[in-house]
Image: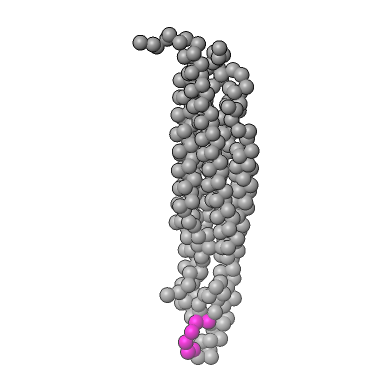
Amino acid sequence: MTDPVVLGDPAGCSRLGGAMRREAAHLTDRAATLARSGAGLDQWRGPAGSAARDRVTRALTGMAATARALDRAGAALQRYATELGEAHEQGRRAADRAARDGLRVVDGRVLEAWGPATSEEAERRRALVPGHQARLDRLSSGLGRSRAQLQRTCEELTGVLRAQSRALRDAPPPRP
Amino acid sequence: MAAQPSVDPATLLAVSERLARAREEAFALSGELLDHYVETGDTLTQHAVDQLVEQAADTLRALTDSFGESTRALREAASRYTAAERSAAPGKGAP
C-alpha cells in the first residue's frame, strides 16, 4: 500500500459545501416568508410596535447576510473539492509514472525505490528524479494556491458571520 | 381603562408562529452544520474551515435566540392586548 500523494477528502468537502448552499437557499426562502408575514406588524403603533419591528428587521437582515455567507462558503468548498479531486488523480498518475521508472513518492519527494539495482540502473533512476520531482512540485504548487484561496475565503466569511452574531446578540431586548 | 391596541392580537400571534418556526429551523440548521467533518489535507486550511463552520453554527444559534425573544415578546403583547380588549368590552363573548 502506497501513501497518497495528495491528502484531503474531496467528497467530504463537497458534501459540506452542498449542505451550506442548501441551508443558504432555505434561509433565503424563509426570510422572504417572514418578511411578508412581518408586514402585519406595520399597523402596530407606539414604542412596543416600533421595537418589535426593529427586532424582526434586524433578524431578517442577519438571516439574509448569513445566507449569503453560507452560499459563498459552500461554493468555495465545492470549488476546492473539485480541485482537490483533480489533484488526487494527478497525484496518482504521478506516483504511477514514478513507479514505472523505479522511483517512489514519499511526503512529496521523489526517491529511488527500495531493492537491488545495478549501478547503471541506479544512475538511470537518479537521472529521472528531477523530472518527476518537477511534475510533483507543480501539482503541489497548484494545490497550495487552491488551499490558500479557500483559507482566505473562510477567514473573510468567518469575520462576516462573527459580526452578524454580535449584532444579533447586542440588539436591545424586546420591550415588555 | 387600558388603551385599545392598534394591532389585532391575532396578527401578533400569526407572526409569532412564523418566528417560532424560523427559530426551530435555524436551531436545526446549526446542528446539521456541526455534524459535518471534512479533511482538507492541510493544517491551516483545515483550521480556517473548522472556524468557519463553528462560527456559522454560532450565528445560526444567535438567530435562534433572536427569533425566540421576538416570539415571546409578540405572544406576551398579544396576550396583553387580548386582555385589554376584554376589559374594554366586558359583556362581549359572555354567555
Check the picture and name the quadrant holding the N terminus of chain A: bottom left
The residue depicted at 55 percent of the width and 12 percent of the height is: B1
Q: Main secondary structure of the magenta part?
A: loop
Front residue of A22/B79: it is B79
Front residue of A131/B77: it is B77
Up/down of B60 relative to A139, above or below: above
Asked if residue A6 lies in the magenta stretch, the reply is no
Name the spot of residue A128 as percent of width and height, x first: 55, 78
- On the question of residue A93 being in view, the answer is no
Front residue of A176/A8: it is A176
Asked if residue A115 lies in the magenta stretch, the reply is yes
Count the marks: how many? 0
The residue depicted at 49 percent of the width and 40 percent of the height is: B26
The residue depicted at 58 percent of the width and 53 percent of the height is: B51
Range drawn in magenta: A112-117
- On the question of residue A122 being in view, the answer is yes
Name the spot of residue A42 as percent of width and height, x first: 56, 20
Check the picture and name the quadrant holding the C terminus of chain A: top right
Name the spot of residue A146 as percent of width and height, x first: 58, 57
Q: How is the image coloured?
A: one colour
Up/down of A71 relative to B91, above or below: below
Residue with the most extreme left position: B95
Up/down of B61 relative to A99, above or below: above
The residue depicted at 49 percent of the width and 13 percent of the height is: B87
Up/down of A135 relative to A38, above or below: below
Name the spot of residue A57 as percent of width and height, x first: 58, 29
